[in-house]
Amino acid sequence: MRSVNLHEAKTHLSELVGSAAAGEEIIIAKSGIAMARLVPLEKPEPRQPGLAKGKLTDAFFEPLSIEELDAWTQ
């Protein structure tokens, strides 16, 4: 785990993001006090086509009521 100060993090953000994406954990500190942690994101699981097949009723395809439409625009 690497620790960098805030100024260095601002100056080298692209490099630090690349290091985090490669699996490194980076602590960002201000005046020697840890303020944030830069870590890699978990990779999302691939989507599985057809997961809802057979689970949707015909009501799913019916037009929305005026009340439901109004709720979307508020």
Image (tube, grey):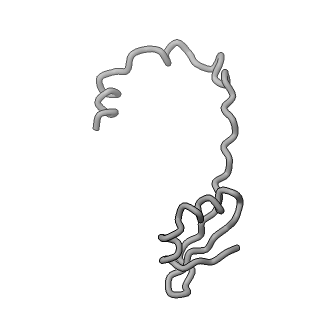
For residue 41, side relative to residue 32 (left or right): right
Q: Is the N terminus in the top left, top right, bottom left or bottom right quadrant?
A: bottom right
Is residue 30 depicted above or below 36 in this figure?
below
Q: Residue furthest top?
A: 58
For residue 15, side relative to residue 6 (left or right): right
Residue 8 percent coordinates (x, y): 52, 75
Residue 32 percent coordinates (x, y): 55, 87
For residue 18, side relative to residue 63 (left or right): right
Give the mark count.
Answer: 0
Is residue 43 depicted above or below 51 in this figure?
below
Which quadrant of the structure image shows residue 3? bottom right
Residue 63 percent coordinates (x, y): 39, 16
Residue nearer the viewer, 54 or 51: 51
Residue nearer the viewer, 35 or 65: 35
Is residue 45 depicted above or below 52 in this figure?
below
Q: Is the C terminus in the top left, top right, bottom left or bottom right quadrant?
A: top left
Residue at point 66%, 24% (across, down): 49
Residue at point 69%, 35% (across, down): 46
Residue 71 percent coordinates (x, y): 32, 34
Residue at point 29%, 30% (across, down): 70
Residue at point 67%, 75% (across, down): 2
